Every structure is written in C-alpha cells, then in structure tokens.
Image (tube, rainbow, N blue to C red):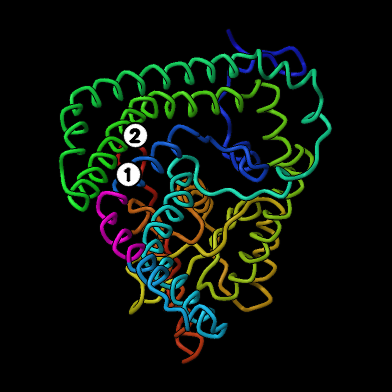
C-alpha cells in the first residue's frame, strides 16, 4: 500500500537527489543494527582467535609481576606505584591491538550502508521522543513488528547453532578436565574463541536479510508525491517569471558579446535592412570564414551601425544574407554549400581594400550564386 503525503496524494515518486541530500543533513540515512552487531561480533571473535595468545601472555606477565612482590617492595610506596604503572602498561600493550580493531570496526561499519553522517539536528531535543503515545505507536508500528521478528529470528538461529556446535564439541569440552592446566587453558581458550566465531557467524544470515530491508524502508520513507516533486523543481529552478528574466539577461549579455566582435569582421552581408551577417576570415588561421555576429531587424541595424563606425565593408546580397542567417550558427564556420558564394564576396572585399589603398581601379562587384535545395 502506497504512503500518503500531507496533501492526501500518494507517495509514488522516487526521492530526488536534493531530497536525499536534505535527509542526510538531518541524519536520515539507512542504518542496519544487525550489520553493526555482526561485524563487531565476527571480527571480535577473529581478533580473539588470532590475538588471544598475545593478550594472554601479557596478562600472564602482569599477574606474575603483581604476585611476585617482596615484603620490602610492598612497603615501598614509590616502588608500588612503579610496579602498578608497569602492570597497566603491560596490560594495555596486550589488549591495545584488539581495542583498535574493535574501534575501527565500530567506526567504519556504518559507512558501508549510507556513509558517515553527523547531524546536529538529529541530536536536538524533540518532545515527541519522550511522548508515551508516540513511543507506543513506534512499538506497534510495522517497523516495531519487524524488529520483533528479527529479535525472535536471531534468538532461534543463534540458539540452534550454539546447541548443535556445543553438542558436537561436548567430548572435547569434557576432556579438558583430564589435561594439564596450561594445555587445558590453551585448548579451552581456543574452543571458546571458535564457539564465539561460529555463533557470531550466524548473524551474517540476519544481516543479509536486514540490509536490503533497511535500504528499501529508507527509500519508502523518503518517497515523494508528484506535487512535492513539482514544488522542489520550482524552488530549485526558480519561478517562471524569474527564469524568464534570467534568460532575458543571458540573451542581452550574449548579444553584447556578439556586438563587441563586429569590429573584428571583414565584411557584413546584408538583406539590405532585414538581415545582417558579419563574417571574419584569416587565411593562415582559418579553414573557412567564421560567423562572428548575425541578426535581423533591430539587431541587424545595430550590426550595420557598428560596421559603418568601424569602416567595415557592407555588402548587399539579399539571397546570400538570408541563406547565411538560415543555415549558419554563431561563432561557427559557414555551411559548406555557401563556401563559393562567400569566397566571391571576400575576394571582392579584399581586392576593393587593396585598390583603395593603392589608388587602383575599383574591381567588378560579383553576383554571388546561391545553390538551390536540390543542388545542396
């Protein structure tokens, strides 16, 4: 059954990245107590098996030093403090690796599911946490039922495995009484560690079920209604009038940058009044002419105005101007089917500039040929 939001709509939509990020800031991340318990128990039992002899040897040294004091040492307060410090140091050296292992396990295991999350808001006092009615509601909720099922399952699985394992090791356990003390202690410690490991390993099964459930439950709690998704998009992207204003400003800035490039053009091809396209070509640097500015009506007028102010040649060729405006893109090379026509115009412009500088005869004005759609 789908959840319902505050407005009565069903929560059918997956949480958005913003919803997930906000939830993490509040400390709402998937967590599995079973995964934490399993990791600590299994690694703890492995640590006892591999570090048990090391810890026992240090504890033995500490006890040997503590029970071998002479009468003079007992009445020497300075010596007693020195012996006490040595005993503490010896004991800590023995158990420090195991404590470090357990600390690292407790810190890094939660990061496997949902990552680390520290939220001051999650630590804040909330009256509902001490409300008895809220507490009863949590106990008898679906989550409370799941916790009860897990507790019963853990008890049954651990109990069955423990009984089976200990029953199989009963002969060895009873045989400890017939062994020498040092051998019995070592053998007993090994049996204890192995029993702890086997029983702890049963929690892997519980964790394998609990982890997917916690991920699913977390996603279900963060699901959103369609209205919540729309509201978030509106808050994230802004209101329509604000977005419209932003687009208008962006267009104005783009137009301003385009106008600043007009003085660098070699020729302005016009309609003559409705369209204007500014072209730039550097023989050694470009493979084809580049469109540095283009526009129609008012923008075309401004392009021509800037061109006249900067003594840039204006070439009237209505068909070519319309074709360039329709098929070209700003700051891109002109289309291939217009190369020949534009080349005629640029050749005329460059020849005209040379003729003016050297006082030569004005070259003949070309009539650029524009290929038809069938020819293209």
Q: Position of residue 139 (x, y in %)?
A: 66, 17
Please give the range of residues in magenta.
Answer: 47-60
- Judged from this view, the residue extending furthest toward the front is 71
Give neighbour class at mark 1: few <14, some 14-19, many 20+ (Cα, 10 Å). many
Instruction: Mark 1 or mark 2: name the one nearer the start of the chain.
Output: 1
Circles 1 and 2: CB distance less than 8 Å?
Answer: yes
Q: Quick check: is 15 in the magenta stretch?
A: no
Q: Nearer the viewer, residue 32 or 278?
A: 32
Give neighbour class at mark 2: few <14, some 14-19, many 20+ (Cα, 10 Å). many
Q: Could you tell me which residue is drawn at 58 percent across and 71 percent down? A: 261
- Judged from this view, the residue extending furthest toward the bottom is 358
Q: Position of residue 93 (x, y in %)?
A: 39, 69
Our reading of the magenta stretch's main secondary structure is: helix
138 with respect to 346 (left or right):
right
Q: Could you tell me which residue is drawn at 29 percent across and 38 percent down? A: 197
Cα separation, mark 1 vs mark 2, equals 8 Å
Q: Could you tell me which residue is drawn at 65 percent across and 21 percent down? A: 226
Above or below, 350 relative to 59: below
Q: Could you tell me which residue is drawn at 68 percent across and 42 percent down? A: 26
Q: Position of residue 182 (x, y in %)?
A: 21, 53
Q: Position of residue 82 (x, y in %)?
A: 50, 82
Above or below, 204 relative to 145: below
| Residue 212 showing in the rendered view | yes
Above or below, 192 relative to 338: above
Q: Secondary structure at mark 2?
A: helix
- Judged from this view, the residue extending furthest toward the right is 127
- Residue 45 circle label: 1
- Residue 200 circle label: 2
């Amino acid at each position: 059954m789908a959840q319902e939001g505050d407005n009565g709509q069903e929560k059918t939509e997956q949480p958005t990245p913003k919803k997930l990020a906000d939830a993490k800031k509040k400390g709402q991340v998937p967590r599995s107590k079973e995964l934490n318990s399993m990791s600590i128990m299994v690694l703890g039992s492995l640590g006892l098996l591999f570090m048990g002899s090391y810890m026992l040897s240090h504890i033995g040294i500490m006890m040997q030093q503590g029970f071998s004091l002479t009468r003079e040492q007992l009445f020497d307060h300075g010596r007693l403090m020195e012996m006490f410090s040595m005993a503490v140091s010896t004991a800590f050296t023995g158990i420090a690796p195991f404590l470090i292992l357990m600390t690292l396990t407790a810190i890094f295991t939660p990061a496997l599911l949902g990552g680390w999350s520290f939220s001051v808001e999650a630590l804040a006092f909330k009256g509902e946490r001490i409300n008895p009615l809220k507490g009863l509601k949590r106990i008898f909720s679906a989550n409370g039922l799941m916790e009860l099922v897990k507790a019963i399952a853990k008890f049954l699985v651990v109990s069955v495995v423990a009984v089976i394992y200990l029953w199989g090791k009963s002969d060895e356990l009873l045989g400890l009484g017939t062994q020498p003390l040092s051998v019995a202690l070592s053998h007993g410690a090994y049996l204890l560690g192995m029993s702890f490991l086997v029983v702890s390993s049963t929690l892997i099964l519980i964790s394998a079920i609990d982890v997917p459930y916690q991920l699913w439950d977390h996603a279900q709690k963060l699901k959103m209604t369609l209205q919540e998704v729309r509201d978030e998009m509106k808050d994230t992207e802004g209101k329509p009038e604000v977005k419209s204003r932003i687009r208008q400003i962006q267009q104005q800035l783009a137009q301003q940058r385009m106008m600043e490039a007009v003085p660098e053009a070699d020729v302005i091809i016009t309609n003559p009044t409705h369209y204007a396209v500014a072209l730039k070509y550097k023989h050694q640097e470009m493979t084809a002419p580049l469109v540095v500015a283009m526009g129609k009506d008012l923008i075309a007028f401004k392009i021509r105005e800037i061109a006249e102010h900067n003594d840039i040649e204006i070439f009237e060729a209505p068909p070519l101007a319309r074709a360039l405006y329709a098929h070209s893109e700003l700051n891109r090379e002109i289309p291939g089917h217009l190369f020949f026509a534009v080349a005629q115009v640029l050749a005329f412009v460059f020849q005209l500039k040379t003729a003016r500088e050297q006082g030569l005869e004005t070259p003949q004005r070309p009539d650029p040929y524009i290929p038809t759609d069938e020819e293209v």
